[in-house]
Image (spheres, rainbow, N blue to C red):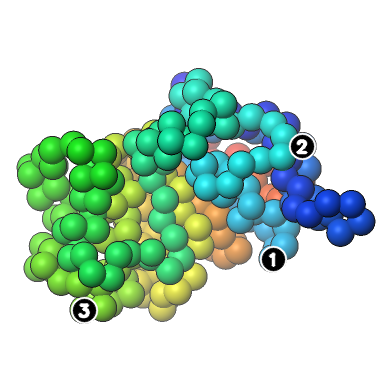
Amino acid sequence: MEILRIEHLSKIYGKGESAVKALDDVSFSVHKGEFVAIIGPSGSGKSTLLHMLGGVDRPTGGKVFVEDTDMYDLDETQLAIFRRRQIGLVYQFYNLIPVLTAEENITLPLLLDKQKVDRQLLDNLVKTLNLQHHMNHLPNQLSGGQQQRVSIGRAVIANPAIMLADEPTGNLDSKNSSEIIDLLKMLNKTFQRTLIVITHDERIALQADRVISIEDGRIAKDEVIRP
């Protein structure tokens, strides 16, 4: 079942002679439960694409459908609510709130949405993330790997349609990098979370079901690694 559809997406920064075309007529779709890696060199447009998919920045042209809702047909308030409910974002530098505990950071999307926290769901997620003994810790009391686990918990707590990870291992050592990728893969396969990872690391990309290569703002290759 198709969960994400991108149609003729473009993004231009600036105007006139100084205009830069970051994305140029990008189209593809993603099915529910797929693990897709998007790779490309620095400046290729892959991070811009992630911002478009995550509802962080509006495109110059084109459409992004998540479960048949055109995100950019929504006004700013509707888009913020839709993004919070349907898109789980994992960043390279964690983006945790420094004055909130690990538990408060994980449950923040629910609290912002005025939803009650399901304690059993939270407890199960915390065990999966191996954070049982760190829920009352502030981010600066956690290691980089633990902070990224909190970030992943925050991204999945609201059961979003799509998880987007932007260089999720870029700030971690090799051991923590391997553990984070294994965790994301487990969430993808065991819980059927649709996962899109932006990365420059081909070793990570080759663990995906499918690899999309971006060059100069366009799709250069779209290759299924494992059906």
Real-space Cα separation, disc 2 to disc 1, in angstroms: 19 Å
> Would you place residue 197 above or below residue 60 in this image?
below
Which kind of residue does numbered mark 2 sit on? Asp
Question: Left or right: 73 with respect to 185?
Answer: right
Q: Earlier in the sequence, mark 2 or mark 3?
A: 2
- Residue 63 in sight in this render: yes
The disc at residue 42 is 1
Q: Mark 3 belongs to which amino acid?
A: Gln
Q: Nearer the viewer, residue 181 or 113?
A: 113
Q: In this view, does 11 lie above or below 215?
A: above
For label 2, the crowd category at 10 Å Cα-Cα, with few meaning under 14, some 14 to 19 and many 20 or more, is: some
Q: From the viewer's perspective, is 93 left or right of 70? A: left
Q: Is mark 1 on a helix, strand or loop?
A: loop
Which quadrant of the view contains residue 43? bottom right
Label 3: how many Cα within 10 Å (few below 14, some 14–19, many 20+): some
Q: Residue at image x 38%, y 45%?
A: 88
Residue visible at 18% across and 65% down? 101
Q: Residue 25 carries which label?
A: 2
> Which residue does the numbered mark 3 point to in the structure image?
141
Q: Closer to the N terminus: mark 2 or mark 1? A: 2
Name the residue at 46% across, 48% down: 164
Q: Which amino acid does label 1 sit on?
A: Ser
Give how far across and how far down residue 223 sits, in percent: 65, 42
Which residue is most to the right? 17
